[in-house]
C-alpha cells in the first residue's frame, strides 16, 4: 500500500550532496589557490628574467653572422652545381648536332659499310660494346635488305663514337618512319612489342625542328632504368624522318653531378619548368615497366606554402635561398637555374648544420638553466608540502561527511534492497515502506506499483503461453496430416526420372501434387494451388485432392476426370475458394502427354537436344469457380532428353526484399542450364536459385515443383 506523504520541506539527494561538496570544494580551492598562486608567481618571474638575459647574449654574439655566411655559401654551391649540370646537357646537345649532320650526309649518299659490326635482333653480340643491333618494329614497312636499312647501318660508327666520347650516356640510337631501329650498345634486350615510333621522344622530335628533351624521366625499353632523352629529327625526301636519340640515366645525373654536394650532408633535387622532379637522392622507377609511366612527383603538390613558394621561384629561373620546414625540420633551400634546359637545381640543408657553432655558448645556457631549475625545484617542493597538508585536511573532512551521508542514504537503500530481493524470490506481495520525503520514497512507491503490475502480467503470460503451445501442437498435427496426402516416393517409370517438392509458406499450405496410376500402364500427374493460405487453404486442399484423385483413378483422359471433380468442388466450396489445377496423363511407351489446364501456370518443356524452351498454351477456368468446366486438352510429344516442369505461382512469384519477382525468365534459365542433370538435382537447383534470389525476404506463397525428365537413349 502507498502511504500519503506528510507535508515537509523536501530536498532531493542530489541537492543535499551537491550543497555539501560545493561548500567543501570552494573552501579547499580557495586555500590551495592562494598558496599555489604565490609560489608559481615567484617561479615564473625568476625563470622569465633569467631566460631573457641568456637569450639576448647568445643571439647578439653569433646567430645573425653565422646564418648570413651559411646562406651565401649554400647559394654559391647551388649555382656551381647548376653550372656543372648545364655542361652535361650542353655537351649532349653538341654531340647530337654532330650526329645529326652525319645522318643528313648519309641520307644523301649511297649506303656505306660501317666498321662497327651491326647485328640482327635475333643474334645480338655477346658483348654489347662490340657492335650495334638492328631491330624492326612491329608492322615495319621495310626489310634488312632494303636500301634504307643498309644506309642506316652506316651510322653505327657515329653512334659508337658519340657513346664512347661521353661516359654519361647509357645508349645512342636512331629510328625511322619505316620502323627500323639501330641502337648502340647492342644489348639485344628490347621487348617484342617495342615500336620506337610510338615513343614520346620520337613523336615530339618528328613534330618539330631542333633538339627535344623529354619533359620528365621514363623507363627505357633497354633496361637502363629511369632516363632522360635528347632527340632530334633528320628529314629527307627519300626516307622521311630519321630520329636520333641519346639517353642519360637519372642515376648518372644524381650521383655524378647534382649529388656531389656538401660531402653528402645536403639533399639535391632537379626539377623542370613545370615543377616535376627530374631526379633526387633515392629516385627509382621501382617495378614500373618500359610501357608504363613513372609516378609523377611535383614540387607544387606539397601542402606547405613555403615549399610551394620555393618551387615557384625555381620554375621562374631565379637564384636564391629560402627557409622552410621539411619533414618537421627547419631547412635552408638554395636554388639556381640550369639555363640550357630551363630547369632548376635545389640544394637543401638543415638549419642545424649551419648554426652548429652556436653550441659553444651552451655552457652559459646550461648554467642559467641550472639556476632556474634549482629555484623551481625549491618552490615546487614547498608547493607539494602545502598541497599535501591541504589534501590531508580535505580528506578527513570528506571522510567525516561520507560517514554522516552514509547513515542518511544507506537506510532507504537497504530497505529497497530488501524489497528487490523479495521480488526476485517471487514474493510479489511484499511492500517497500520508506518515508524519507525524497526520491527514495518515490522509488519505493514505484517498486510497489511494479509488483502489482508484475503479478498481473505473469498471470496473463501463463494464460497466453498455454494457448500458444496448444495452437502450435494443433498446427504440427495438421502439417503431419497434410504431408501424408502427398506421395511418399515418386513412381519408378522406365525411361523417366521424376522428382517433386512442396514448401508451404505457413505451418500448412494450399499447394499439392499427386501421381495416380490409370489404365494401360499410364500415369496421371497432378499439381494444384488452392486460393489463400493457412488452415482454410489446407482444408480446401484436402477436399480437392481427394475428389481429383478419385476422378483420375482408372480414367482414360484428364478432361472428363477434372470436369467431374469440378462439379463436386463447385457445389461444396465456399464462394471465395477455388483451386487451379494442371493434370497430364503420361504414356511411357509413346512418350506423349495428354494435358488439361484449369487456370494453372502453364508448364515448361525444355528440349534436351537444343535447350529450346516451350510453354504450354492451353488455359482454362480454375476449378470451383463455375459448376460446369469446359477444357480443351493439349498434347505434348516428348523426346529422349526432354525436360517437363510443372510448378505453382509460388515459384515465379517469389519476391526479393525489393518486391521483384523471380519470374519465368529466371526459371527458364536455370532449367536450361541443368537440363542434363537428374530430376532431383534439377529440382534442388531451382529451389536453391529461388532462395538465393529472395535472400532474407520472407516466403510469401507456397512453393510446389514437379520435374519429369525423359532419360536419353543408351
Image (cartoon, rainbow, N blue to C red):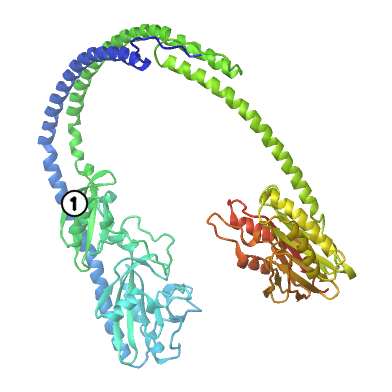
Residue 131 drawn at (x, y percent): 42, 78
Q: Is residue 336 left or right of residue 556?
A: left
**Looking at the image, residue 264 lies above or below residue 585:** above
* Residue nearer the viewer, 127 or 101: 101
**Looking at the image, residue 1 lies above or below residue 665:** above
Q: Residue at x 14, y 31 (%)?
A: 55
The image quarter in which residue 142 lies: bottom left
| Residue neighbourhood size for the residue with mark 1, other residues' Cα within 10 Å, grouped as few (<14), some (14–19), many (≥20) | many
Residue 440 drawn at (x, y percent): 43, 15
The image quarter in which residue 274 lies: bottom left
* Residue nearer the viewer, 328 or 685: 685
Q: In this view, does 174 lie to the left or right of 693?
A: left
Say what secondary structure mark 1 lies in.
helix
* Residue nearer the viewer, 438 or 123: 438
- The answer, for residue 710, to whether it is visible in the render is no
Q: Identify residue for label 1.
A: 74
Amino acid at each position: 500500500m502507498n502511504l500519503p506523504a506528510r507535508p515537509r520541506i523536501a530536498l532531493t539527494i542530489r541537492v543535499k550532496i551537491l550543497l555539501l561538496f560545493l561548500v567543501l570544494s570552494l573552501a579547499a580551492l580557495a586555500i590551495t589557490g592562494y598558496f599555489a598562486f604565490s609560489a608559481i608567481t615567484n617561479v615564473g618571474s625568476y625563470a622569465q628574467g633569467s631566460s631573457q638575459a641568456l637569450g639576448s647574449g647568445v643571439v647578439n654574439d653569433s646567430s645573425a653572422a653565422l646564418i648570413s655566411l651559411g646562406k651565401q655559401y649554400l647559394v654559391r654551391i647551388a649555382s656551381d652545381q647548376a653550372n656543372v649540370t648545364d655542361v652535361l646537357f650542353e655537351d649532349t646537345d653538341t654531340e647530337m648536332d654532330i650526329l645529326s649532320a652525319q645522318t643528313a650526309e648519309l641520307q644523301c649518299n649511297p649506303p656505306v659499310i660501317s666498321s662497327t659490326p651491326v647485328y640482327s635482333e635475333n643474334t645480338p653480340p655477346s658483348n654489347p660494346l662490340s657492335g650495334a643491333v638492328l631491330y624492326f618494329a612491329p608492322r615495319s614497312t621495310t626489310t634488312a635488305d632494303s636500301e634504307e636499312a643498309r644506309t642506316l647501318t652506316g651510322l653505327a660508327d657515329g653512334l659508337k663514337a658519340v657513346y664512347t666520347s661521353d661516359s654519361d650516356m647509357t645508349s645512342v640510337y636512331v629510328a625511322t618512319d619505316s620502323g627500323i631501329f639501330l641502337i648502340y650498345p647492342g644489348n639485344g634486350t628490347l621487348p617484342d612489342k617495342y615500336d620506337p615510333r610510338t615513343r614520346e621522344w620520337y613523336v615530339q622530335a618528328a613534330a618539330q625542328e631542333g633538339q627535344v628533351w623529354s619533359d620528365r624521366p621514363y623507363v627505357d625499353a633497354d633496361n637502363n632504368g629511369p632516363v632522360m632523352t635528347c632527340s632530334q629529327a633528320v628529314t629527307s625526301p627519300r626516307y622521311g624522318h630519321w630520329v636520333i636519340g641519346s639517353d642519360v640515366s637519372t642515376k648518372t645525373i644524381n650521383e655524378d653531378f647534382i649529388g656531389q654536394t656538401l660531402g653528402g650532408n645536403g639533399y639535391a633535387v632537379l626539377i623542370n619548368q613545370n615543377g616535376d622532379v627530374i631526379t633526387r637522392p633515392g629516385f627509382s622507377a621501382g617495378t614500373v615497366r618500359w610501357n608504363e609511366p613513372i609516378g609523377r612527383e611535383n614540387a607544387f603538390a606539397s601542402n606547405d606554402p613555403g615549399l610551394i613558394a620555393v618551387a615557384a621561384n625555381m620554375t621562374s629561373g631565379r637564384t636564391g635561398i629560402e627557409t622552410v620546414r621539411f619533414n618537421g625540420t627547419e631547412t635552408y633551400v638554395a636554388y639556381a637555374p640550369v639555363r640550357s634546359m630551363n630547369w632548376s637545381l635545389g640544394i637543401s640543408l638543415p638549419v642545424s648544420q649551419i648554426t652548429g657553432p652556436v653550441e659553444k655558448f651552451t655552457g652559459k645556457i646550461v648554467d642559467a638553466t641550472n639556476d632556474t631549475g634549482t629555484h623551481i625545484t625549491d618552490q615546487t617542493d614547498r608547493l607539494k608540502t602545502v598541497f599535501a597538508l591541504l589534501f590531508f585536511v580535505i580528506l578527513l573532512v570528506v571522510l567525516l561527511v561520507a560517514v554522516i551521508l552514509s547513515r542518511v542514504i544507506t537506510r532507504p537503500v537497504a530497505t529497497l534492497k530488501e524489497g528487490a530481493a523479495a521480488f526476485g524470490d517471487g514474493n510479489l506481495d511484499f511492500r517497500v515502506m520508506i518515508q524519507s520525503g525524497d526520491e527514495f520514497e518515490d522509488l519505493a512507491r514505484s517498486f510497489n506499483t511494479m509488483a502489482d503490475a508484475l503479478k498481473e502480467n505473469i498471470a496473463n503470460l501463463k494464460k497466453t503461453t498455454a494457448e500458444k503451445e496448444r495452437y502450435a501442437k494443433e498446427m504440427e498435427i495438421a502439417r503431419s496430416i497434410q504431408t501424408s496426402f502427398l506421395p511418399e516416393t515418386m513412381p519408378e517409370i522406365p525411361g523417366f526420372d521424376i522428382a517433386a517438392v512442396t514448401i508451404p509458406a505457413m505451418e500448412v499450405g494450399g499447394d499439392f501434387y499427386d501421381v495416380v496410376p490409370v489404365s494401360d500402364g499410364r500415369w496421371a500427374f497432378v499439381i494444384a494451388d488452392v486460393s489463400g493460405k493457412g488452415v482454410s487453404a489446407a482444408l480446401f486442399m484436402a477436399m480437392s485432392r481427394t475428389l481429383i484423385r478419385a476422378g483420375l483413378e482408372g480414367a482414360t483422359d484428364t478432361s472428363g476426370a477434372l470436369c467431374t471433380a469440378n462439379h463436386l468442388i463447385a457445389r461444396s466450396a465456399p464462394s471465395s475458394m477455388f483451386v487451379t489445377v494442371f493434370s497430364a496423363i503420361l504414356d511411357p511407351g509413346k512418350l506423349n502427354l495428354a494435358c488439361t489446364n484449369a487456370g494453372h501456370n502453364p508448364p515448361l518443356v525444355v528440349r534436351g537436344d537444343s535447350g529450346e524452351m516451350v510453354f504450354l498454351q492451353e488455359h482454362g477456368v480454375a476449378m470451383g469457380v463455375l459448376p460446369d468446366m469446359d477444357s480443351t486438352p493439349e498434347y505434348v510429344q516428348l523426346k529422349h532428353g526432354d525436360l517437363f516442369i510443372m510448378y505453382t505461382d509460388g515459384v515465379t512469384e517469389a519476391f526479393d526484399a525489393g518486391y521483384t519477382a523471380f519470374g519465368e525468365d529466371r526459371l527458364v534459365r536455370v532449367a536450361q542450364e541443368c537440363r542434363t542433370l537428374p530430376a532431383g538435382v534439377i529440382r534442388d537447383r531451382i529451389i536453391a536459385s529461388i532462395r538465393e534470389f529472395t535472400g532474407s525476404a520472407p516466403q510469401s506463397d507456397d512453393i510446389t515443383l514437379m520435374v519429369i525428365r525423359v532419360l536419353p537413349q543408351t
